[in-house]
Image (cartoon, rainbow, N blue to C red):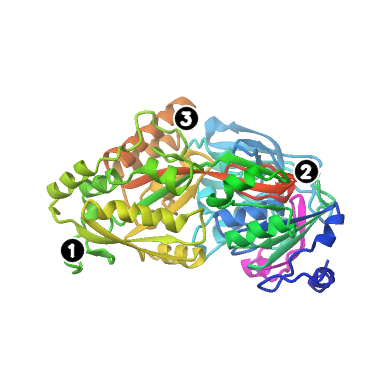
Amino acid sequence: MKRSEFLRAVAATGIAAAGGLPAVARAQSADADTLRAGVKLSPTSMDPHFRLSGEQNLLRALHARLVGMTPDGKPEPGVAESWQPVEDGRAWDFRVRANAKFSDGSPITAEDVAYSIARVPTITGSPGAYHIFVRAITRTEVRDARTIRIHTAEPYPFMVEDMTEVAVLSRSLGPDLKTADFNAKEVKVFSGPYTLEDFRFGEFMAMRRNPHWFGTRPDFERAQLKFISTDSSRVAALLAGDVQAIDELPVADVPRLRRDAALNVTQIAGMRVMYVAMDMDRDASPFLRDSNGQPLTRNPLKDARVRQALSLAINRQAIVDRVMDGTAAVASNLLPEGTPGTSSALGVTPFDPDRARRLLAEAGYPNGFQATIHATNDRYPNDEKVAQAIAQMWSRIGVRTEVITMPNATYFAAASRQTFSIMAAQYGADNVSYAYRALVHTFDRERGLGTANRTRHSSPRADALVAQALTEMDETKRNALLAQAADVAIGEEAIIHMIYHPAYLYAARKPLRVTPYYNGAFLPQAVKKG
């Protein structure tokens, strides 16, 4: 469907939406084959290799991965039906499904997989690149039309998990395929359960079922997604029947939505953590001042005692109970307790403001200092309120803290330039290895590590443990090394503060039901009719 046709069809219903795209009218509810959904975040690029971030998850509807993923984050067959390590873990063989096809009917082959992997490191300008998932690969070997062997320099146990992130594209798109080509709607071949009909950033996306999709057939022929960033507007659209399903339920509305007999509310414990990261890199950091408001020439965040004091001053349970209204769980690790590679020795940091004050005094700040937390105001449920709560807790121990918030798109671009001294955000990962490599590891552009480490915090001791884990094929030994790294980085050195693990909540008008995903993805193929 061309955009002009799409707009005319919706305009005919007589219901207009703010921002340009008409809300899909109730008159269309008679079309049982069309899903109408309100989604909070718009992709920032239509290139599935451009940016690793939550809003890009929607592109999984258009572009399949070599390895699929279950709603709770476990690998399952995708474009590949099977895989196995070879050459003592220094290579992996992936076998492409015999019935795998692109939307134009052409077969998906090992050559297409090789093309897709080779393209990822060529992408530039991303604030959160996919390079980490192909960094270990030294070369790919197409052994036959359906078998690709992926080689690494060292034994590498995470190849299967890495391949759940890399979208498979058709090599027919050519060697000069650019991100701009996707954004200009010039790409017409897809490997996912849906194909793209039209989109406008920040407004809408229209999809149609891929007739050559090799997986489970989606329940809906068409999906019409409207991007509604304001939480109250998204809920209002659902209650009015203008959309049939929404994601990212606002915390304050969860109780009444659960009580609504017309709705199905679903949720899942997220493989995500809300964290606070601090600038440990610069001797003088831009948003730190002494108790009189003068710029500090010595960065207090470089002192572990100060970092530990700030962690002790945060009442995590109060944030979960009062700010998040119970829709989260207090965090002690990078991912929820019990996730392989997390540390059982790490308990939740106790709320102990008296000890926090003593540590500040020991570090040379008996009168505290002044700081600024930067946070988003439109990305996560209650993100601004959480930052304000932390600021108040720090102020009570003498670290007078103000909060500056900004929209998601502005925030992460500024954070990538190391603009902030202290940032509050969330990070999600499939496993502890990813979380450590991207969020906690010392920034290393050449090795593709620390890609989400935007404050340049660093723990060389923990990094060394992770380096061992990355080549350890024995799962038990590997997880023990990762747990030790967490003990050092989060516990002993407090280079990053874990606050809580949020739940992801969705709602749909009955009889529809949204299958929740551990990473918060809203996937049209995961919305079921009953």
The label on residue 60 is none
Give the magenta range: 175-200
Badge 2 element? loop
Three-letter residue code for mark 3: Gly
What label sits on residue 338 in the rendered view? 3
Viewer-closest of 149 and 305: 305
The correct choice, above or below, for 266 with respect to 409 in the image is above
| Residue 357 x %, y % | 18, 47
Residue linked to disc 1: 290
Residue drawn where x is 28% and y is 65% of the image: 287
User: Which residue sits at x=65%, y=54%?
Assistant: 58
| Pointer 2 residue | 511
Residues at discs 2 and 3 in contact (Cβ within 8 Å): no
Label 3 secondary element:
loop
Q: CA distance from mark 2 to mark 3?
A: 34 Å
Looking at the rendered structure, the number of numbered marks drawn on it comes to: 3
For the residues labelled 1 and 3, say whether their Cβ atoms are less than 8 Å apart.
Answer: no
Question: Depth check: 232 or 110 in front?
Answer: 232
Find residue 529 and report its horizontal and vertical position in percent. 79, 44
Q: Quadrant of residue 259?
A: top right
**Which of pointers 1 and 2 indicates the residue nearer the eye?**
2
Q: Earlier in the sequence, mark 1 or mark 2?
A: 1
**Other-residue count near label 3 (Cα within 10 Å), few / some / many at <14 / 14–19 / ≥20:** few
Would you say 221 lies left or right of 286 here? right
Residue 431 shows in this picture: yes
In front of the other: 378 or 477: 378
C-alpha distance separating marks 1 and 3: 41 Å
Residue type pointed to by label 2:
Pro
The residue sitting at 53% across, 33% down in the picture is 89
